[in-house]
């Protein structure tokens, strides 16, 4: 959407800093974004995930908040009583570990603070205290939000370590536990060995949520050693033909629970964190194992150990069981080895294995080949380095999992589904101790402290049980009944609900609220941030706001569970007098607080980045269903993609992180807001660049200049009605069309499209309108332009609030465009044929320009011929037929027309013309066809005559002779018989 445009307006003409300051001041003084319970107005409550204050916000952070602010401002103009509040999330370990790094004089961090964040030298030493860090960035972020023009009610601000907030979280956790949703036990979690603490998205480099894989570890035997292999498909144990070992890896012999295991060093370390007692005894080279026979304890058979370089020491135990019939990788590795004479000779081994089929699927089973061999052929895979192998593997695994059945002659699991067979084998190997469970991380993840994370089996840890079946069902119910934008993301939520299990909800360190029944633990950051939206309607009364009178506030110390039960859950069996007494407030105040909550809750819209779907947003859904009755469940979630800088991900290492406040300082808030939103639709990553910011800023300057030039429109009252000409009807109708399209785009969060309408389509309309007036030597300074400009500024107001307020003031309108009503559609101003009128003029000029350019004629005379009445009749018939039957089949239409007496001859005489007319119709949009059908008639003569002044302006001069004839006109000047080529909406042209 970026256009090449040089900046014409210097800051002296439009000073962003002054304008922003002025309006920020006026908004604050007039408290226009402070909203209260008002029984006469519809409310709209929207929230954004609150920021974690461990760094200043950069341009990338701004997108979600800006989107939410646009939404808030739009709803306000739609006459809702909008509540848009903000809090700050202090909970967790990252701020604490940052302060530890400052204490230990970490140069890298200190330099980041100085160079990138521009924090003054005298402040940094105070960061040894975690809360000082949080408070510093808290204020920094808040200031940035104000400078961006976010319409936030700041009276409701809080931090998650405020006492009142902690009271809410304690209440939440006691309730979850009462409902059986908090469990204590041993469960695997992502873990940082350095910090001795679980890790989640907030703690990892690159903000990656750790995903765990659960393997079955199957113990093969070799002499008195255990050789364990990790597998996701234990049912295929019956099909194992050999094991794969990497000959170049150094393995270890480790004493594990009194058995001698042969595994990689990496695996021994992983198993330690899974609470096995591990002591490494000695080392053994992979090559020493090649050719040995190992014992499969499940079916009492011996299989050989073969070499394979694809075996990765970081996966599982570094030893892999081979099932060539059902694993394409194994099959291909087997073939590759058979053909590798050097290796065979080197180890003195012979490979004569036959794949053992154990699973049947209709799609992949055959009499001659194994499923793996079949699919390799299908994908034409020739060796084990082929990237298509991955895809083939996924396809076969998925098909066998969903549609596979174990062959009848297989022991124990014959004839069972793959799913059931897997459960049985898993149970059996664990019971008989020929296998166990092993966890590892799906991808390598690093903690922010730099340490590689592992999976730890945590004992006596507190978990929120997202694996609870009934709870999952409630979460599905909420997802099914809420609005999710964009709609395509709904399934992603269901997938997350699907796989979520127990999740560690407390840690031993960090900032936050202590578990109410076990004081050693602190509730972690993705668990204390799921129902806090309910605190916003209350926080106004709990804040230490000095403006609040004593009788209007409740002290955090005096809050208790009964208070929250009464206010948030409206429990009936509670004695209001007792609640008021225990909270040391009047019953009147208690009722006021409750009414405020009942009025604003539920959340109407929750905004967040797409990266929070696998955790925060889904936990938000879960916890609302657990804590609140259905009428308090959230109504909508809006998810957006992230922001790229010049096409690249923003990161410290790339040095392309631009602090938000710095960008505002340089370019102004509105150009930044618009650039964030205009470069892509909501789910895509948007590409931010300062070139786009400049282009958009100069677009705003253009609008400003147009308003200034026509300032008199707004200061002098224009009483006289203007003479209404074709282009006036048209611009008037276009305004309605833009309102209609922009409103529906905003409703569906197609923000890019909305901005395209306001910034670019409206520009095109205005330019055309000005050209037409200029050609007629008439002024555009009229009521139509006035309406156009007023509408444009109103539409722009949610997106560019500072700019719009400033222009609104030039209009002489008061006091705030922020509180104007959103433009309504006025049907009476929609003119059906005005669009065709102007289109016809445009096309005519364009066609003539094309002809003169090609033929290099300097025209003296231009003759234009409109189609005959008979052709027009035919056009309407064709249009009607195509629309009704929705057929574009030329043959069908022709057949029908030949039977129509009225036009039979016509069709017979010139089938080519009919074909062209059908093509004309089909090339128009459905909307245009519909519109033309609704018009009784359309006289092309009128616009063509009207547009003649512009045609002369564009093509020649006043002396150019231009005439318009109808084809039916017997007196027409038509020396070359051109008029017979005319078609409706496509006049014929003759130039000489
Ligand atoms: Zn760490």
Image (spheres, rainbow, N blue to C red):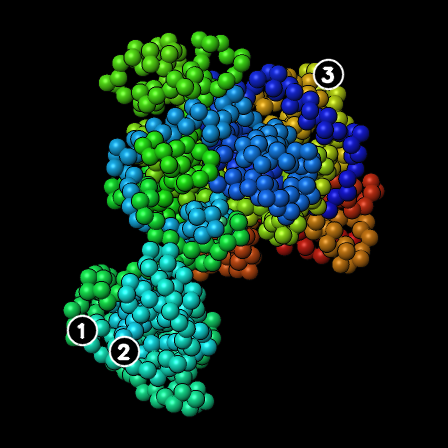
Neighbour class for label 1 at 10 Å: few (<14), some, many (≥20)?
Answer: some
Residue 420: image location, x then y, percent: 21, 61
What element does badge 1 sit on?
Answer: loop
Picture quadrant where residue 246 is located = bottom left
Neighbour class for label 3 at 10 Å: few (<14), some, many (≥20)?
Answer: few
Residue found 38% across the figure and 27% down from its top:
168
CB at disc 2 and ligand 1 closer than 8 Å? no
Picture quadrant where residue 426 is located = bottom left
Exactly how many numbered labels are in the figure? 3
Q: Earlier in the sequence, mark 1 or mark 3?
A: 1
* Residue 65 seen: no
CB at disc 1 and ligand 1 closer than 8 Å? no
Q: Nearer the viewer, residue 378 or 339?
A: 339
Residue 826: image location, x then y, percent: 53, 26
Q: Is residue 992 above or below residue 101?
A: below
Mark 1, residue position: 410
Q: Is residue 883 above or below residue 976?
A: above
Residue 572: image location, x then y, percent: 25, 18
Mark 3, residue position: 716
CB at disc 3 and ligand 1 closer than 8 Å? no
Q: CA distance from mark 1 to mark 2?
A: 27 Å
Q: Mark 1, mark 2: which one is toward the viewer?
A: 2
Picture quadrant where residue 434 is located = bottom left
Neighbour class for label 2 at 10 Å: few (<14), some, many (≥20)?
Answer: few
Residue 1: image location, x then y, percent: 64, 46
Q: Earlier in the sequence, mark 1 or mark 2?
A: 2
What element does badge 3 sit on?
Answer: loop
Mark 2, residue position: 223
């Amino acid at each position: 959407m970026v256009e090449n445009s040089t900046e014409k307006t210097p800051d002296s003409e439009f000073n962003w800093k002054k304008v922003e300051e002025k309006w920020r001041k006026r908004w604050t003084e007039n408290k226009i974004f402070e909203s209260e319970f008002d029984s006469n107005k519809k409310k709209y409550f929207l929230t954004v995930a609150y920021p974690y204050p461990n760094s200043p916000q950069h341009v990338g952070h701004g997108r979600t908040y800006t989107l939410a602010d646009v939404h808030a401002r739009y709803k306000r103009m739609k006459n809702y009583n909008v509540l848009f509040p903000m809090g700050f999330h202090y909970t967790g370990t990252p701020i604490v570990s940052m302060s530890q790094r400052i204490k230990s004089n970490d140069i890298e961090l200190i330099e980041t603070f100085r160079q990138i964040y521009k924090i003054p030298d005298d402040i940094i030493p105070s960061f040894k205290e975690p809360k000082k860090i949080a408070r510093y960035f808290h204020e920094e972020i808040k200031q940035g939000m104000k400078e961006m023009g976010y319409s936030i009610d700041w009276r409701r601000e809080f931090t998650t370590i405020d006492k009142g907030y902690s009271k809410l979280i304690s209440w939440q956790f006691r309730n979850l536990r009462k409902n059986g949703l908090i469990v204590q036990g041993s469960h695997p979690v992502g873990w940082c060995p350095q910090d001795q603490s679980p890790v989640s998205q907030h703690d990892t480099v690159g903000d990656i949520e750790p995903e765990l894989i659960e393997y079955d570890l199957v113990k093969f035997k070799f002499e008195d050693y255990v050789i364990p292999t990790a597998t996701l498909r234990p049912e295929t144990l019956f099909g194992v033909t050999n094991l794969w070992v990497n000959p170049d890896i150094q393995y270890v012999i480790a004493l594990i629970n009194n058995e001698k295991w042969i595994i990689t060093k990496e695996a021994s370390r992983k198993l330690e964190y899974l609470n096995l007692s591990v002591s490494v005894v000695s080392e053994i080279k992979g090559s020493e194992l090649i050719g040995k026979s190992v014992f499969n304890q499940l079916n009492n058979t011996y299989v050989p150990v073969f070499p394979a370089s694809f075996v990765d020491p970081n996966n599982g135990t570094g030893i892999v069981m081979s099932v060539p019939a059902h694993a394409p990788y194994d099959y291909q590795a087997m073939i590759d080895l058979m053909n590798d004479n050097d290796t065979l000779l080197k180890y003195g081994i012979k490979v004569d294995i036959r794949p053992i089929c154990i699973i049947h699927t209709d799609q992949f089973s055959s009499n001659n080949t194994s499923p793996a061999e079949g699919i390799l052929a299908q994908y034409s895979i020739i060796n084990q380095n082929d990237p298509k192998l991955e895809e083939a593997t996924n396809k076969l695994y998925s098909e066998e999992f969903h549609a596979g059945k174990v062959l009848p002659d297989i022991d124990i699991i014959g004839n069972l589904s793959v799913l059931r067979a897997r459960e049985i084998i898993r149970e059996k190997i664990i019971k008989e101790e020929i296998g166990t469970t092993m966890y590892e991380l799906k991808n390598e993840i690093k903690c922010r402290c730099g340490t590689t994370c592992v999976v730890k089996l945590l004992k006596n840890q507190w978990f929120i049980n997202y694996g609870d079946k009934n709870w999952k069902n409630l979460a599905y119910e909420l997802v099914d009944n809420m609005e999710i934008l964009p709609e395509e993301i709904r399934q992603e939520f269901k997938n997350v609900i699907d796989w979520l299990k127990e999740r560690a909800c407390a840690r031993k360190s960090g900032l936050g609220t202590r578990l109410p029944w076990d004081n050693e633990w602190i509730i972690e950051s993705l668990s204390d941030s799921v129902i806090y939206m309910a605190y916003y309607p209350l926080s106004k009364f709990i804040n230490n706001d000095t403006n609040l009178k004593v009788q209007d506030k409740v002290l955090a110390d005096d809050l208790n569970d009964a208070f929250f039960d009464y206010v948030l859950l409206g429990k009936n069996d509670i004695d209001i007098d007792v609640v008021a007494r225990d909270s040391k407030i009047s019953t009147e105040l208690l009722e006021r607080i409750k009414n405020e909550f009942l009025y604003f809750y539920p959340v109407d819209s929750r905004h967040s980045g797409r990266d929070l779907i696998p955790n925060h947003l889904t936990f938000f859904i879960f916890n609302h269903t657990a804590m609140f009755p259905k009428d308090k469940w959230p109504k909508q979630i809006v998810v957006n993609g992230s922001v790229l800088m010049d096409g690249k991900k923003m990161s410290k290492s790339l040095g392309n992180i631009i602090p938000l406040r710095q960008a505002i300082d340089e370019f102004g808030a509105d150009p930044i807001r618009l650039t964030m939103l205009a470069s892509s639709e909501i789910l895509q990553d948007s590409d931010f660049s300062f070139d786009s910011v400049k282009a958009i800023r100069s677009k705003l300057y253009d609008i400003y200049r147009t308003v200034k030039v026509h300032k008199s429109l707004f200061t002098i009252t224009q009483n006289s009605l203007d003479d209404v000409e074709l282009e006036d009807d048209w611009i008037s109708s276009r305004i309605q069309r833009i309102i209609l399209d922009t409103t529906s785009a905003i409703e569906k969060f197609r923000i890019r499209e909305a901005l395209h309408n306001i910034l670019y389509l409206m520009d095109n309309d205005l330019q055309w309108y000005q050209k037409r007036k200029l050609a007629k030597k008439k002024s555009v300074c009229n009521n139509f332009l006035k309406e156009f400009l007023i509408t444009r500024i109103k539409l722009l107001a949610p997106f560019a609030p500072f700019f719009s307020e400033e222009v609104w003031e030039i209009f002489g309108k008061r006091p705030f465009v922020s509180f104007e009503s959103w433009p309504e559609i006025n049907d009476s101003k929609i003119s059906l044929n005005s669009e065709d009128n102007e289109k016809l003029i445009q096309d005519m000029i364009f066609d003539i320009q094309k002809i003169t350019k090609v033929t290099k004629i300097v025209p003296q005379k231009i003759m234009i011929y409109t189609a005959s009445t008979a052709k027009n009749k035919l056009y309407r018939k064709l249009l009607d037929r195509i629309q009704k039957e929705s057929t574009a089949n030329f043959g069908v239409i022709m057949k029908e027309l030949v039977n129509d007496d009225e036009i039979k001859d016509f069709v017979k005489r010139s089938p080519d013309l009919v074909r062209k007319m059908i093509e004309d119709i089909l090339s128009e949009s459905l909307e245009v066809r519909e519109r033309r059908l609704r018009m009784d008639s359309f006289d092309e003569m009128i616009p063509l005559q009207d547009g003649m002044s512009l045609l002369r302006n564009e093509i020649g001069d006043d002396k150019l002779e231009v005439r318009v004839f109808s084809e039916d006109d017997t007196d027409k000047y038509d020396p070359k018989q051109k008029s017979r080529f005319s078609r409706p909406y496509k006049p014929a042209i003759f130039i000489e």
